Image (cartoon, grey):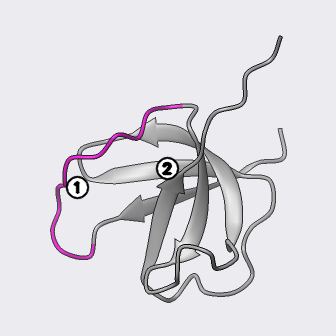
Amino acid sequence: MGKTLLEFQSTKGDVLPAHKFGTHDVVVLKLNKADSGSPALGQGVVFRLKDSSITVAFDDIPEEGLSSPLRLEKLANEVCN
């Protein structure tokens, strides 16, 4: 389907802390130290959840910032009428 899957893991251990992400949630990828109003590196959809990782499907791979610590922020899911 032309999507790129990126798997994100914690830098602090092998199990992720408690979170509210679910499959099919829309998320944005940001630099970890970025302000809340800063632009996102990319937007994707949670594809898979494991105890130790979150896999996100992106249409476009972010070109910069992937070697820096990152964070995922959940967005409101869109509802179709």
* Residue beneath the point at 34% across and 53% down: 53
- Where residue 76 appears, x then y in whole percent? 60, 39
Contact check, label 2 and label 1, Cβ < 8 Å:
no
Q: Which mark is on residue 55? A: 2
Q: Indicate whether 61 appears above or below 56.
A: below
Quarter of the picture containing the N terminus is top right
Residue that label 1 marks: 16
- Where residue 25 appears, x then y in whole percent? 56, 37
- Where residue 58 appears, x then y in whole percent? 71, 54
Q: Indicate whether 21 appears above or below 30.
A: above
Closer-to-camera residue (31/37) = 37
Other residues around mark 2 within 10 Å, as few (<14) / some (14–19) / many (≥20): some
Is 67 left or right of 3, judged from the image as shown? left
Q: Indicate whether 11 appears above or below 33.
A: above
Start-end of magenta stretch: 11-23
Counting residues from the start of the chain, the first of labels 2 and 1 encountered is 1
Which element carries disc 1, helix, strand or loop? loop
